[in-house]
Amino acid sequence: MEQLIPQIVFYTFSLAMVLSAIAVITVRNPVYAALFLILAFVTCACIWMLLEAEFLAITLVLVYVGAVMVLFLFVVMMLDINMDLVQQRFARYLPVSLLVAVIMLIEMLMVVAAKNFTVELFPMPAPHPLGYSNTEALGELLYTKYLFAFEVAAVILVVAIIAAITLTLRKRPNTRHQDPSKQVQVKKEDRLRVVKVETDTEYGKHT
Amino acid sequence: MMDHLMALGWILIKILAITIPLILAVAFLTLAERRVIGAMQVRIGPNRVGPWGLFQPFADVIKLLMKEVILPAKSNRFLFVLAPMLTLIPALVAWAVIPFEEGMVLAQIDAGLLYVLALTSVGVYGVIIAGWASNSKYAFLGAMRSAAQIVSYEIAMGFALVGVLVAAGSLNLTEIVLGQQGGIWNWYFIPLFPLFIIYFISGVAETNRAPFDVAEGESEIVAGFHVEYSGAAFALFFLGEYANMILISLLAALMFMGGWLSPLEAVPGIEGTFLAAPSIVWLLLKTMFFLFLFLWFRATFPRYRYDQIMRLGWKVFIPITIVWILVVALFVVKQWLWWAP
């Protein structure tokens, strides 16, 4: 019983994950593909949760599902993709893509080869005691043992952000545009002038 | 076997004990909104159904359920029906880690704060999918606005929560509240004041409430993402939005205003009485205060323009939060704290 429930949960989520991952690359509609990718991420997070990696699992949902895929969907929904054209190009790019695929397959096989993943090498991890904080353990490792790698990753990300911004930033000199920062700082005195107008009417003089 | 079933049944009872009062709260919040805004605009508001209009929400629910659910001919049926559920489910699931009092929590998990943040960000899919599946220009525009807005404000909100986490030294919501013990000056809204303000404003933006409700924008895009919805499906969107409002208010109370701790905790003369004791009543009162702010904002502020929303999120809130996280971190490292870490 103790073993059975986690196994049922594991196989259910693994099946869902593998099927949705296959669906990502087989469905025609790009919006469906993005939605299946989200499903794959969520099921993957559930499997990580089974491994007691709750920090990583929640972060996966937070970062990939909550932010990255929202932007993905944002772009994909705006595209008007002509699937016939995509299929025509399929044959043309086939040799190059096959080469890349074969290289990636060899690389993956070298890492995920059966001899690297035997039961002897990976014994069942002992469950952590009740007060064990995954977040704290991860933080400690990240800021002590892997501090240098962590900082390098941060620098690379900052460079990537700046590069992406400079690539998309174009200044077109002759366009008119609003500057909301200036607009919100406008005071009543800048725009409004209360004028007292003396009026003459047939009933007399009003001021 | 029996033990497992018992445990499961107990969890189900707890879930019902959270969701049923929550749904009732949503029902009466809609009434409160109409009455409060009515009073602010010198109107009466609904007062005909039952005493003081108290049965109005039930009349509304019955009306919505009796209406026909219309599926637009060119819509994507499956996603169109799925979208309202995707709005409501994360809004309800997030309540699993909310502590109502010390020990009164469904799931005592260590990464509670992250869990809540993750689920509130997942809620945007309901809006995006609704907009796309409706196959309508207005709905689609609303969905795009909502996606951009939520992604932008989530960053500011996340950074505000990082400030709380630095001050409390824990991601567990119960421990965050217990870290604020010892009187009102220990509550995190004082040392984290800018983050508190930014958190609440981002919360208003995340729930698509006025003045950040460009996703609905009645005057330009009719009703935005839910323009094609009717009847029960429309009611689900509403339920999700109001459940999220209550969640954001409750979280603001937990993280910045001492949760269930009494504001009179350290006042001399009343120690030991019910006024100084921590209780769920304080938490609910604080939540109601924040909910009142939601309604007040709606009655007061005109809707932001889309580019102004983006400017506020990216150019004002995110820099302020980053600076204040550094300030708080400095306070914690140098031990310049009057509150206990």
Image (spheres, grey):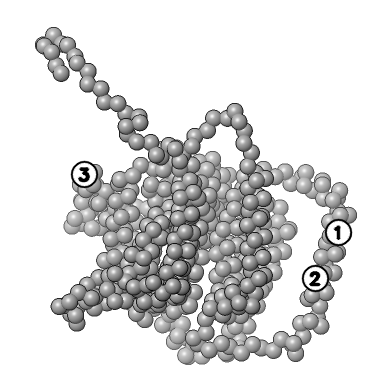
Marking on residue A98: 1
Of mark 1 and mark 2, the one earlier in the sequence is 1
**Mark 2 belongs to which amino acid?**
Met
Alpha-carbon distance for marks 3 and 2?
69 Å
Question: Which class describes the residues within 10 Å of circle 1: few (<14), some (14-19), or many (20+)?
Answer: few
Alpha-carbon distance for marks 1 and 3?
70 Å
> Label 1 is found on which chain of the structure?
A
Query: To which quarter of the image does residue B59 belong?
Result: bottom left
Residue B319 visible? The answer is yes
**Mark 3 belongs to which amino acid?**
Arg
In the image: residue A117, left or right of residue B217: right
**Mark 1 belongs to which amino acid?**
Leu
Question: Residue at position x 88%, y 54% from top?
Answer: A95
- In the image, residue B20 above or below residue B109: above
Dot 1: element: helix
- In the image, residue B78 above or below residue B311: below
B310 and A124: which is toward the camera: B310
> Label 3 is found on which chain of the structure?
B
- CB atoms of marks 1 and 3 within 8 Å: no
A163 and B62: which is toward the camera: A163
Where residue A23 appears, as percent x and y from the top left, is: 70, 61
